[in-house]
Amino acid sequence: MGSCITGWAHTVFGKSDADSAEALIAEVVKDCLVHAQTDASEIDAIFVGAFNNGFSKQDFQASLVALAEPALRFTPATRVENACATGSAALHAGLRQIESGRARRVLVVGVEKMTATPTPEVGDILLGASYRREEAGIDGGFAGVFGNIAQAYFQEYGDCRESLARISAKNHENGVRNPYAHMRKDFGFEFCNTVSEKNPVVAGPLRRTDCSLISDGAAAVVLCDLDVALASAPRAIYFRAAEHVNDFLPLSRRSRTSFQGAAQAWTKAYETAGISIDDLSFVETHDCFTIAELMEYEAMGLAAAGQGHRVIDEGVSTRTGRLPVNPSGGLKSKGHPIGATGVSQHVMAAMQLAGVAGDMQLDDARLAGVFNMGGAAVANYVSVLERLK
């Protein structure tokens, strides 16, 4: 059958004036339906991605969508959570609902309100995406988890701090072009590569510029089955593949120097889509920390183990390189409101494929790869998207 994205909406990420996740949801729901040229009465199911885990006392976020659009009052609505991949988990739930034949049009919303929570509490909340039994005591909270990953990677393959700084600088430079980005500032390589009062070490070898931002935001898409999309939708961004692979949660049970679950998800996506990495026009990937993007280069097949640094050092992943990675600025610049991130990545990819990405627009964007992960490459989601109309 197949499914398509037919419309979308996206708030500006950052410190929002919206006082709650409910208000953020309200910012995107009606706009998304209008963009998809879909009446609320035509929506068969709603899936909401929200990590929450302490960011708000108001849970049960799926029930909030109807408050934004009362015509959705009696539409089945479900909240989905899968750590930092919560947005993609909600998308996949929508895709499966369509594939099962239970729905023809689905509304998917990703949302998180994070900035009202004190930063130390945010770190502890995010540790819920790690294996607390073994990892709760790591210095630096969730950043410490990736700091340990970076340290292990450096010990095995050599110090890559300069390459991480190049990734950060690239994504911030790209983010300047993104009107939805939290941090629209080009810091440059030297600033990102230098430890300073404004760029201190956060955890292990990771500096502040190696870490994504605490953000508020929401994004939404309408999904339609292929027949509906081709017959009546204003646009159709087709899922050539949508794969999900899990790995062990405890880092003690697997390698710290490779994302094996992510690699399997990419392999399955290439097989399902009938392509290789050489066919992709660009990738939106999950750079919660710069070490993650570097290791994801290896997982997606851009480099051999231990050679991920060459992808950025040789300019392969820049806007003008062979495979631009994170032309939106990624999580590093755009921000990382946990539940919204996976939906946002798909919106950014859809905008590129539809040719409406504005200053972000790449030349001849035909096939997109999207990677969103929960935890340290525990829940791994890969999409391959192309425009049909």
Image (spheres, rainbow, N blue to C red):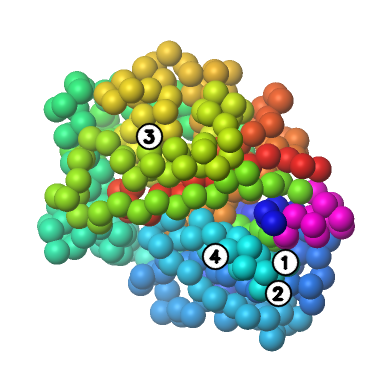
Report whether 354 appears left or right of 171.
Answer: right
Location of mark 2 (residue): 44
Secondary structure state at the residue bearing disc 3: helix
Which residue is at the front of the view, 202 or 229? Answer: 229
Say whether disc 3 or disc 4 marks the residue closer to the N-terminus.
Answer: 4
Amino acid carrying label 2: it is Asp
Range drawn in magenta:
224-235
Location of mark 3 (residue): 299
What residue do we see at 55% from left, 38% from top? 369
Q: How crowded is mark 1: few (under 14 residues within 10 Å), some or many (20 or more)?
A: many
User: Given contact means CB atoms under 8 Å apart, are the residues at marks 1 and 2 in contact?
Assistant: yes
How many angstroms separate mark 4 from mark 2 (CA)? 13 Å
Say whether disc 3 or disc 1 marks the residue closer to the N-terminus.
Answer: 1
Location of mark 1 (residue): 105
Amino acid carrying label 1: it is Arg
Q: Which mark is residue 93?
A: 4
Say whether disc 4 or disc 1 marks the residue closer to the N-terminus.
Answer: 4
Queried whether the magenta region covers residue 14, the answer comes back as: no
Q: Which residue lies furthest to the right in this view?
A: 232
